[in-house]
Image (cartoon, coloured by chain):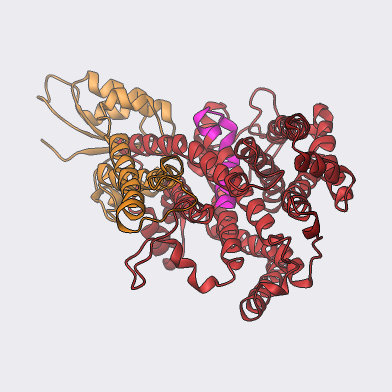
Chain colours: A orange, B red
Amino acid sequence: MTKPLVAEFSDADSLIKAAVHLKREGHQLLDTFTPFRLPELDGILVVKPSRIRLAMLVGGLAMAAFAYFLQWYSSVINYPLNVGGRPLNSWPVFLLVPFEVGMLAAALSGLAAFLWACRLPRLYHPIFDTTDFARASQDRFFLLAAQTGEQEHSASLREVLKHSGALAVREQGL
Amino acid sequence: MSVIAPTRANPAHPWIAAKHASYGEVTALIADPVLLRPAGWRWWVALGVSGLFVLATVVAIYVLFTEGIGVWGVNSTVVWGYAIASYVWWIAIGSGGTLISAMLLITRQRWRASVNRFAETMTVFAVSISGLFPILHLGRPQYFYWLAPYPNTMLLWPQWRSALVWDFWAIISYLLFSILFLYIGLLPDLATMRDRATSLSGQIIYGALALGWRGSAHHWRCYETFQITLAALAVPLVVSVHSIVGLDFAASLMPGWQETIFPPYFVVGALFSGFASVAILTALVRWGLRLEAIITIHHFNAMAKILLLASIVMTSSYATEWFMAWYAGAPADRSLLVFLFTGSYAPLYWMQLLFNCLVPQALWFPSVRQNVLCVVLIAIGINIGMWLERILIIWNTLSHGYAVSLWRLFYPTLWDWILLFGPLGLFVFFFLCFVRLVPAVPMNELRKLCREEHVA
């Protein structure tokens, strides 16, 4: 297998067309780098759905349960205080703090899960060395693909990318 | 440096007022003012003036901390004053910023792209400022951390049934949540700034904050999932935070406060004044950063419609209050209602109704909604009206409680006024710094909008 190739496109539609085309030709579509979200790519690239929301649910509920426990423990066990005959476990008002901190904990667990799923922070990545790659966050659309299969059976990857309207095709990191 | 030529709003793509706007052009439109364009004398003058307000605030806080809350107009009957009204007013503005951003994201309103960033920023600054007021009002502010449960030598716990403790957790959770929501929205834009920065310090700072964002398909998918889920959490969070603010009053036993309508009524008030503030900021950012091409008259039209709706809900909330006071038949409540309309503070109450209920009805007319100046003036009126609402909730009830012998009025002092207007300068100061440091409009969402509107 040769080094993966990076193709640069000027618009989103050409990138999507090229991605579909090269998969049909039997090549391996590794990743795309775009300046904004393109939901069409999920189906083509087969991006795994992430578990971010599950982490948020678990983190939020765990923190809420802990906050309730803390209130219950402090006002029933550790420091019972009779205020006007109100029940020690005043559950209706004890729901307020768990709700607030549970939401915050859900957001923070989501952040951790998001960073884990994206493998960030990672300030350097080999793809950054590719010529013109700084424009992937601005106005250009990049595609990373690897050649598979025998050359004589399928058109070479470079040809496929060139024909799909790529502005330039380079090896990764060059 | 390319600037998109703004044209008249086009019905085919209402949210972009330009014939053509490429991805590169919209990126430059937002990023260049931060990275390349010098600040200009107007910015420096504004920063200097707001800096004076900040200085006045610091002095007022110093005087307050050294002399005690006796420097304010609060007395043994009207124990709450400007600080609590400002607290509610500021946190309401913050809540409005989150609601506009999160609700428009969940309901997939595309025009959100141009306004959500500074709405979220407004939230962070407004909530930070609002969090100051309860601490200033504590009397012994140096002990504010007693609100948190921590192992201490006094073997004491916070009183979980106290509204002050609820406020503490609500503000802390909400502030941190808003900062996270703002930062996640910023992440792809920080990568753009990293890639466009020409100075080494810019590359290092934006690069570190961007965490190595590459914009890969997987990144974008995780990003979208996380952002939408955060937005879905933000709406109930804001509603709960502002309900807790309403409970500060409703959980008491005072006439005019002990009402079940208070939590939702406060949430609507937050939406109302928050949207009004966003409308004012939108006009200022549009003018200051020359963003006529991406913030169109249709944006003001859409915001004005929301303001109109909120005004109607607000009016019906007031009417419900009046009706319930009469219908419930409690003498103290009925007496308070008469005091609202005819008592010592009545001119202010009429002014509140004028600004919150009557004037916004002008927004029924499309010509008013599509006039930026009219929308901004009405929005300023709403913010004044909403501040009056908050101070009057406090003044009327406390000045006219159950015990007639305790009836007293509130007379503000110089320090009350300084702590009312000073934080406005603090907000402006923060906001001026913000527009010079980060892109005021989410560039990635704007590029997406350009594709969807077929102008790219």
Q: Is residue B280 left or right of residue A36?
A: right
Residue B201: % across, % down? 43, 67
User: In which quarter of the view is residue B59 placed?
Assistant: bottom right
Which residues lie in the magenta part?
Answer: B103-123
Q: Residue furthest front?
A: A85
Q: Is residue B302 visible?
A: yes
Residue occupying image coordinates x 88% and y 49%? B343
In depth, the one of B429 and B234 nearer the eye is B234
Answer left or right for B247 relative to B14. Answer: left
Main SS type for the magenta part?
Answer: helix
Would you say residue B1 is visible in this rendering?
Answer: no
Q: Nearer the viewer, residue A164 or B418?
A: B418
Asked where in the image residue B204 lies, by quadrant, the reply is: bottom left
Q: Residue at x 73, y 60 (%)?
A: B78
Q: Position of residue A75 (x, y in %)?
A: 36, 53
Q: Residue at x 29, y 21 (%)?
A: A21
Q: Residue at 54% x, 39% y: name it.
A: B239
Query: Up-down: is A171 above or below B455?
Result: below
- Examine the image and state in which quarter residue B295 appears: top right
Count of numbered circles on the image: 0
Residue B117 belongs to magenta span? yes
Q: Position of residue B251 (x, y in %)?
A: 58, 46
Asked whether B180 falls inside the magenta stretch, the response is no
Q: Position of residue A34 (x, y in %)?
A: 38, 38
